[in-house]
Image (tube, grey):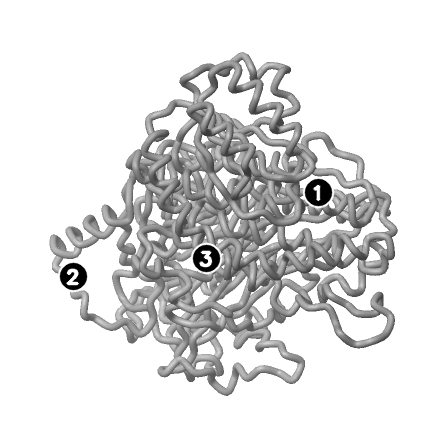
Amino acid sequence: MFTGLKRLEYRGYDSSGMCIDAIDAPTPTGRRESASGDGLANGISADGTSSSNGRVEDRSSPIIVKCPGKIENLENLTAEYVQQHNLDTSKVYKHHVAISHTRWATHGVPSSINAHPQVSDANADFVVVHNGIITNYQALKDILKKNGETFVSETDTETIPKLLKFAYDSMTAEAGSGEAQVPFPKLVMEVLTKLEGAYALLIKSRHYPGELVACKRGSPMIVGIKEGPDGSSSSSSKVSSGGLGRAASITRLRDQYNDSHWTGALEAWVASDASAVIEHTKRVVVLEDNDVLHIVGGGYGIYNTRQADVETAVPRRLQVLQLEVDQIMKGGYEHYMQKEIHEQPEAITQSMRGRVKQQKSAEQGNPYLQQRIKLGGLVETRDTIRRSRRIMFVACGTSYHAALAARQTVEEMVEVPVVLELASDLLDRCCPIFRDDTCVFVSQSGETADTLRALEYAKARGALCVGITNTVGSAISRATHCGIHQNAGYEIGVASTKAYTSQIICITMMALALAEDSISKRERRDAIIDELGALPDKMRSFMQVQDVAMKELAAQLKDSNSLLFFARGNNYATALEAALKCKEVALIHSEGILAGEMKHGPLALVDEHLPIVVVATRDSMYKKMESVIQQLLARSARLIILCTAGDATMQEYAKRSDCQLIEVPGTVEPLQPILNIVPLQLLAYHMTVLRGHNVDQPRNLAKSVTVTD
């Protein structure tokens, strides 16, 4: 459990907790008799659990430990509990359910009381951990208070276990003694109808020992499956010829206590991210919205509350993760962010692999029939995109900056109006979207909540929806009509680095693919494709040198209170992204400013103390950026100029003034932002280390923003 929590540390958290069973669960025979109403009233079952009114009950409360701060605090607190209560840690349970959680505070301050798991009452009849936000929790809370419930935490989550207990007591009273106990998933489904908002829930109960229910809406959730004592699949889980894993070993909700699925062993790991399960199994099922997963004994069933028959299991594909444990390790680097910055040459190579034909064909024939960019995900929709009224990119944060960096390339190649929208702002404005629009949704995780809501909004209005994500099986990749997978590899650092450069590559490839039949664009298009092939080596050529140089520069800037980044054209995105990295990890106030707006306010901030980074590589904006540099030097600005290696003009400025140079290799203008951002990522990284902040877990931030405001 602790290992799984540590694998999810990068997602951001401020407290943690866990709940484990204190005793073994009942045998299937005792449970089946209870479910049929034939159990002994007020007796003792064979496994030592008491039976009351025909229902097997586990009267032993689970063990719950939770605390604010790091997972190490939870480990220490758990060790103290084990020692104080003389628990036998070597005991092997036949059936055992444990749940754990790292909380990122949304309702209530980080504290032991507000940490998850949250319980229904002092006996912990129902125990819940929750990712997401319940938007109608206050109304539910008021109703429960009127029915005598007392709340101890400030969280929205506490309403869920209390609502479960209220529903259980009500349904039990209506059923009467001697009736079969309401199935656990059916009870949960009843409660889900009352919840509004986004959630991923894990639920266990003393009334249903040895059982776990997991459900989701809007928040990511997967279940890793390992069957049999050696982890191999049992005969009941063979993959069908259609490529689908079994629907479930439990096909009907009422069959949950049948003997058929108790013949083999089952281990299941339910998590919000694949990194928490990869050490145990690579066989996973990605749950979809409104799915309810029920794990009991040696089997599981997946139901969906939107189906006409909610008691029949739904088929879900059993996938094999293309992920290795070493991909989620630091691999000799001190931090994940440092590792991922240095992985960028390989990441962009992987993004292009099999998609870009680096060398022109020497064969005779029509050159326009020689396909140099092949994007399988867009084959069927390419013509539709070309005919669009406009192309709209929708994203948040770093993904928005990647779309901004590539916007000009799309406009140039496709000659269709291109607009950019922040997902949250698009929803706030209820932006008009039409059936002949193409909306491209960019998200590293594929689970960003605002982007997902915007996708649903656009889809409902009939637009063609294209996804660009780095996560196979993510919500955005499933919900869009078509798309491009980044193939950049697993990214763990909260501050996105390699996903940013990979996203620019993917959007650029999309633009080149859409311009494939344009005669007028052929020469320009070929020049960009040729440079795509040279890009990884160019990035490697200066990365080590700049790493040392940026560490020295970081030592000079680490005590600064503010930083400004000026740029124009494609590199405006570079300025915004560099400023974001300094905010995210170095915790320095920084602004990315469009240099054309300098005289409209920002120039008033310029003095000899404020560090200013100016991006002035040799592109179509070069002359304009040179003018900006001259104006800043005339005001004694403290300048750092990012320029093309060997630029004599910039070297002359450095000689005449105290400004410093950051030199990068030159390339074609659409790809220059990819090289320009690397030294600025390194600068942000080294400033963070020198300032003593946590690089991979910046305060108040999470890797995947799976809740909306």
In-front residue for pair 413/483:
413
Residue wearing tag 2? 87
Residue 622 in sight: yes
- Looking at marks 3 and 1 on the same chain, the residue that comes earlier in the sequence is marked by 3
Three-letter code for the amino acid on which mark 2 is drawn? Leu
Instruction: Compute the Cα span from label 2 to label 1.
Output: 61 Å
Quadrant (top left/top right/bottom left/bottom right) for the N terminus: bottom left
Instruction: Compute the Cα span from label 3 to label 1.
Output: 25 Å
- Looking at marks 3 and 2 on the same chain, the residue that comes earlier in the sequence is marked by 2
In-front residue for pair 271/361:
361
For label 3, the SS is loop
Three-letter code for the amino acid on which mark 1 is drawn? Arg
In-front residue for pair 667/429:
667
In the rendering, which numbered label is found on residue 343? 3
- Residues at circles 3 and 1 in contact by the CB criterion of under 8 Å: no
Residue wearing tag 1? 407
Residue 607, given in percent of the width and then of the height, sits at 46, 14
Residue 698, given in percent of the width and then of the height, sits at 38, 39
For label 1, the SS is helix
In the rendering, which numbered label is found on residue 265? none
Instruction: Tell me the mark number nearer the camera, choosing from 2 and 1.
Output: 1
- Left or right, 261 with respect to 412, comes to left
Binning the other alpha carbons within 10 Å of mark 3 as few (below 14), some (14 to 19) or many (20 upward) gives some
Which of the 4 quarters of the picture holds residue 145? Answer: top left
Answer above or below: position of 443 versus 484.
above
- Looking at marks 2 and 1 on the same chain, the residue that comes earlier in the sequence is marked by 2
Binning the other alpha carbons within 10 Å of mark 2 as few (below 14), some (14 to 19) or many (20 upward) gives few
